Image (cartoon, helix red, strand yellow):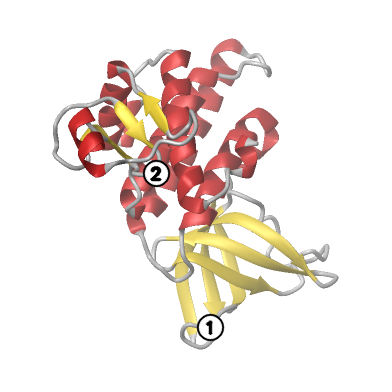
């Protein structure tokens, strides 16, 4: 059966001498792994369409629910080649790719996550183009803007995948609180901690959150991604939220992301 969809290349894995296993993020099938025949040959019909981050319209052939359908066509819609030119930009994108690969299941569609990933790539590319035109400096890297977009992706991704931490109020009674318990994935007020006998082992089991980071998190949870770039958070605020999110992610997948080690 021939099937068509759109996809963004997350990673490729060499197979044999000239073949590739290509992992796509798609709106219709979630994580989709396909077998591409001979794309590593000079005269391959796939050309550069299998480069990481390339957004293409693809066709693949295989029985329904086949574990590794064969990729038959890949037409580039947007290459995002600029994001592969700069290692500082590409390294930050690798972090959200790794997060996505650790949570998304094969053949489990989540269109919101696909659109979030695509919008994030577009905004990071726009940021790169703007800086390049405005300053004409190859070393101009907007750490604050990239950090904002990466944190925004993590917050919304966890929300859309059903793993969002609860840090705006106590996860048990709804009262205010600012002590985030990693093993609970939530803020707990002092009363609920006493009543539930939550065990705290080691300094990283509980994080005390500042009021600004709670407000910042709520904004990322509710604001449209395009509106998020109007925010100008401090580096300290970005780092505080990033620390909470990374510890939460580490607890869920039982390991740190490789890009965070």
Q: Residue 169 versus residue 5: which sits nearer the camera? A: 169
Residue 99 picture location, percent across and down = 51, 47
Crowding around mark 1 (Cα neighbors within 10 Å: few <14, some 14 to 19, many 20+) is few
Q: Residue 83 versus residue 208: which sits nearer the camera? A: 208
- The quadrant of the rendering that contains the C terminus is top right
Q: Earlier in the sequence, mark 1 or mark 2?
A: 1
Q: Quadrant of residue 134?
A: top right
Q: Quadrant of residue 136?
A: top right
Q: Which mark is residue 66?
A: 1
Side of 99 where 84 appears, left or right: right
Q: Residue 1 versus residue 14: which sits nearer the camera? A: 14
Say what secondary structure mark 2 lies in.
Answer: loop
Tell me the residue at 58%/51% (across/down).
54
Residue 15 picture location, percent across and down = 77, 70
Q: Quadrant of residue 82?
A: top right
Tell me the residue at 31%/32% (across/down).
220
Instruction: Determine the CA span between mark 1 and mark 2.
Output: 37 Å
Residue 203 picture location, percent across and down = 48, 28
Query: Does any portion of residue 214 appear in the rendered image?
Result: yes
Say what secondary structure mark 1 lies in.
Answer: loop
Side of 259 where 17 appears, left or right: right
Q: Which mark is residue 183?
A: 2
* 122 w.r.t. 19: above or below: above
Residue 146 picture location, percent across and down = 50, 26
* 39 w.r.t. 60: above or below: above
Tell me the residue at 63%/64% (across/down).
22
* Residue at far right of view: 17
Query: Does any portion of residue 149 appear in the rendered image?
Result: no
* 9 w.r.t. 131: above or below: below
Crowding around mark 2 (Cα neighbors within 10 Å: few <14, some 14 to 19, many 20+) is some
Tell me the residue at 48%/22% (across/down).
239
């Amino acid at each position: 059966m021939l099937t068509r969809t759109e996809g963004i290349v997350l990673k490729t894995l060499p197979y044999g001498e000239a073949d590739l296993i290509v992992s796509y993020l798609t709106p219709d099938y979630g994580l989709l792994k396909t077998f591409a025949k001979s794309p590593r040959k000079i005269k391959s019909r796939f050309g550069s369409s299998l480069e990481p981050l390339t957004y293409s319209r693809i066709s693949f052939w295989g029985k329904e629910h086949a574990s590794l359908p064969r990729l038959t066509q890949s037409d580039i819609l947007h290459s995002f080649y600029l994001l592969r030119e700069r290692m500082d930009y590409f390294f930050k994108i690798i972090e959200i790719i790794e997060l996505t690969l650790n949570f998304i299941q094969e053949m489990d569609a989540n269109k919101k996550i696909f659109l979030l990933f695509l919008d994030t790539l577009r905004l990071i590319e726009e940021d790169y183009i703007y800086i390049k035109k405005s300053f004409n400096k190859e070393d101009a890297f907007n750490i604050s803007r990239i950090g904002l977009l990466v944190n925004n992706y993590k917050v919304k991704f966890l929300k859309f995948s059903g793993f969002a931490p609860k840090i705006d109020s106590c996860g048990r009674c709804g009262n205010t609180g600012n002590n985030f318990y990693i093993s609970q994935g939530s803020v707990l007020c002092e009363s609920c901690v006493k009543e539930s006998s939550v065990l705290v082992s080691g300094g990283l089991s509980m994080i005390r959150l500042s009021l600004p980071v709670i407000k910042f998190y709520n904004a990322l949870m509710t604001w449209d991604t395009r509106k998020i770039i109007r925010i100008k958070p401090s580096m300290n605020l970005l780092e505080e939220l990033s620390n909470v999110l990374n510890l939460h992610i580490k607890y869920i997948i039982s390991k740190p992301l490789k890009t965070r080690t």
